[in-house]
């Protein structure tokens, strides 16, 4: 069964970059689509973007100038980088496997706090 | 962006009670709608996709319906393990967008 696990710093300073890794087991990231979703304090959820089986990407326009999703197929990992973070980027970040338009498999989530 | 208006924000149900949660899209989304359950401290779980298709392993007391702009999730017979937050999500257009969530508690 496919499993996803996020990892990365839990605390990032304002104006710096947030970098997270999603490690996938049980399924190759060279198949299907793999995305990042975040949940803000107060429960609002936001789809951030995805990387496809071929390495192509799609991003939420609200983040387009700050976000990058890349991958390392040799390690079966994909990555999120979000630049110039502010306190409004404080959220729980999830990686997930996209099937058609849905997210059937999720990581456990990692809380990232942006604070000086 | 397509706005997803979810209601109610919270509700309380008794054991065995039937519960309904609704999502209203700001434009037609052609059944491209999913429902998720998120228990406290856990990651979201896909319950329903394509508006009415039950994800494998999800109890049959969960069902989805709707069309056009209006969709609903029904729980036929509230169980203690159904206490959770519920979200809808549209995939008709990018960017995908979510409802604000419904907190369901056992009365």
Image (tube, rainbow, N blue to C red):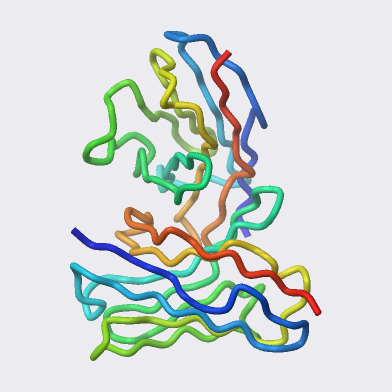
The image quadrant where one finds the N terminus of chain A is: bottom left
Residue B27, given in percent of the width and then of the height, sits at 58, 47
**A92 to the left or right of A71:** right
What residue is drawn where x is 40% and y is 29%? B65
Above or below residue B23? Residue A60 is below
Residue A35, given in percent of the width and then of the height, sits at 42, 69
Q: Quadrant of residue A102?
A: bottom left
The image quadrant where one finds the C terminus of chain A is: bottom right
Above or below residue B26? Residue B64 is above
Residue B61, given in percent of the width and then of the height, sits at 33, 21
| Closer to the camera in the image, B95 or A76 | A76
Residue B43, given in percent of the width and then of the height, sits at 45, 51
Query: How many dots with numbers?
Result: 0
What residue is drawn where x is 49% and y is 33%? B71
| Closer to the camera in the image, A60 or A30 | A30
What residue is drawn where x is 51% and y is 33%? B84
What residue is drawn where x is 63% and y is 30%? B7
Q: Quadrant of residue A26?
A: bottom left
**A102 to the left or right of B15:** left
**B49 to the left or right of A18:** left
């Amino acid at each position: 069964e496919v499993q996803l696990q996020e990892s990365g710093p839990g605390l990032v300073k304002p104006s710096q970059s947030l970098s997270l890794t999603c490690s996938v087991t049980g399924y190759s990231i060279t198949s299907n689509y793999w995305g990042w979703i975040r949940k803000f304090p107060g429960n609002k959820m936001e789809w951030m973007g995805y990387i496809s089986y071929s390495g192509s990407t799609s991003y939420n326009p609200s983040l387009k100038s700050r976000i990058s999703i890349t991958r390392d197929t040799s390690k079966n990992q994909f990555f999120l980088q979000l630049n110039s973070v502010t306190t409004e980027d404080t959220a729980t970040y999830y990686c997930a496997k996209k099937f058609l338009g849905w997210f059937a498999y999720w990581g456990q989530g990692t809380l990232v706090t942006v604070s000086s | 962006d397509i706005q997803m208006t979810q209601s109610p924000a919270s509700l309380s149900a008794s054991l065995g009670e039937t519960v309904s949660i609704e999502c209203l899209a700001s434009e037609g989304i052609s059944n491209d709608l999913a429902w998720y359950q998120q228990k406290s401290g856990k990651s979201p779980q896909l319950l329903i996709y394509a508006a009415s298709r039950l994800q494998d392993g999800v109890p049959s007391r969960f069902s989805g319906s709707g069309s056009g702009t209006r969709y609903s999730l029904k729980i036929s017979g509230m169980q203690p393990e159904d206490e959770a937050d519920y979200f809808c999500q549209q995939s008709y257009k990018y960017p995908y967008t979510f409802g604000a969530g419904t907190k369901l508690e056992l009365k």
